[in-house]
Image (cartoon, grey):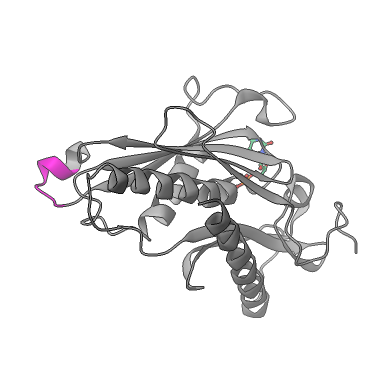
């Protein structure tokens, strides 16, 4: 069965990463994965988060906020700031966890870096694009701290990228677009480190349960795709 986009089962959409797309942010990246476009900025606060200060903890913190613009989709949705959006809250936390997993918080010093991921246009895989593009913005902000003498040791241990995959019309496929996501029998998101290890695996049998073998195949596809995404990150950084 053909994919709606005519892509091969293990073929990602075309990916582009454009850096320095914001004049003010210490790091910024516009990521495009096919029709999905996310603007990621990294902003440095020269303080620890309040909760770390109160608890007398050492080191810094990395956090993320995800939001979709009203017309990122086929029908207008109200702004997150106006109506509470649980989906955005869940995705924000996923992005934060993914990025923190590769950062040494002590080496980051007493700084907080916030990664804002704003979806300009959504066509599936926006959380994964946010992690891949958000990492680029994060690494630029860390470089800003080093260049400005705020820290001496690079706190980033390795790169991180994310990719979706799933079961569509009986076929295991990589990087679902919206048409596939809507009808997927199984839907998964993988956050993968530069060393090919998994940071987070989210997989749901949307229409029926899935097997361990199916999940393992998708993990292999995701690990290969993450290697390509990390190569692209390195080319722009
Ligand atoms: N989507 C939408 N309206 C919404 C949320 C999602 O049209 O309020 C679409 C959008 O194209 C998105 C896709 O559904 O990319 C899949 O959404 P999901 O929640 O699975 O997250 P994503 O795949 O974007 O990480």
Q: Residue furthest bottom?
A: 213
- Which quadrant of the figure contains the N terminus? bottom right
Q: Residue furthest right?
A: 1
- Decide if residue 90 is on the left or right side of residue 113: right
- Decide if residue 39 is on the left or right side of residue 47: right
The quadrant of the picture showing ligand 1 is top right
Provide residue 37's location: percent of width, then percent of height. 65, 39
Q: Which range is magenta?
A: 52-58
Q: Residue at x 67, y 61 (%)?
A: 165
Residue 188 visible in the shown view: no
Q: Is residue 29 above or below residue 198?
A: above
Q: Residue at x 66, y 47 (%)?
A: 16
Residue 206 visible in the shown view: yes
Q: Residue at x 73, y 41 (%)?
A: 35
Provide residue 176's location: percent of width, then percent of height. 72, 54
- Decide if residue 23 is on the left or right side of residue 9: left
Q: Residue at x 37, y 39 (%)?
A: 114
Provide residue 227's location: percent of width, then percent of height. 59, 67
Residue 57 inside the magenta-drawn segment: yes
- Decide if residue 229 is on the left or right side of residue 8: left
Q: Nearer the viewer, residue 162 or 172?
A: 162
Q: Nearer the viewer, residue 221 or 200?
A: 221
Q: Is residue 73 above or below residue 161?
A: above
């Amino acid at each position: 069965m053909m994919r709606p986009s005519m892509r091969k089962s293990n073929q990602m959409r075309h990916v582009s990463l454009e850096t320095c797309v914001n004049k003010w942010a210490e790091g910024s990246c516009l990521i495009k994965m096919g029709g999905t476009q996310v603007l990621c900025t990294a902003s440095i606060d020269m303080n620890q988060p309040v909760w770390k200060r109160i608890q007398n903890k050492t080191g810094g913190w990395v956090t993320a906020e995800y939001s979709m613009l009203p017309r990122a989709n086929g029908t207008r949705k109200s702004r997150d700031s106006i109506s509470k959006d649980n989906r955005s809250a869940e995705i924000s936390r996923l992005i934060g966890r993914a990025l923190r997993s590769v950062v040494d918080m002590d080496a980051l010093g007493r700084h907080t870096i916030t990664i804002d991921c704003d979806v300009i246009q959504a066509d599936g895989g926006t959380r994964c694009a946010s992690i891949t593009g958000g990492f680029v913005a994060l690494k630029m902000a860390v470089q800003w701290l080093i260049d400005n003498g705020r820290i001496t040791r690079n706190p980033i241990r390795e790169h991180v990228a994310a990719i979706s995959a799933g079961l569509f019309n009986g076929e295991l496929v990589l990087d679902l677009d919206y048409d596939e996501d809507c009808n997927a029998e199984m839907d998964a998101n993988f956050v993968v480190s530069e060393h090919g290890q998994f940071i987070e695996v989210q997989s749901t049998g949307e229409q029926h349960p899935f097997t361990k073998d199916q999940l393992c195949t998708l993990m292999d596809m995701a690990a290969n795709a993450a290697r390509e995404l990390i190569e692209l990150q390195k080319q722009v950084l």
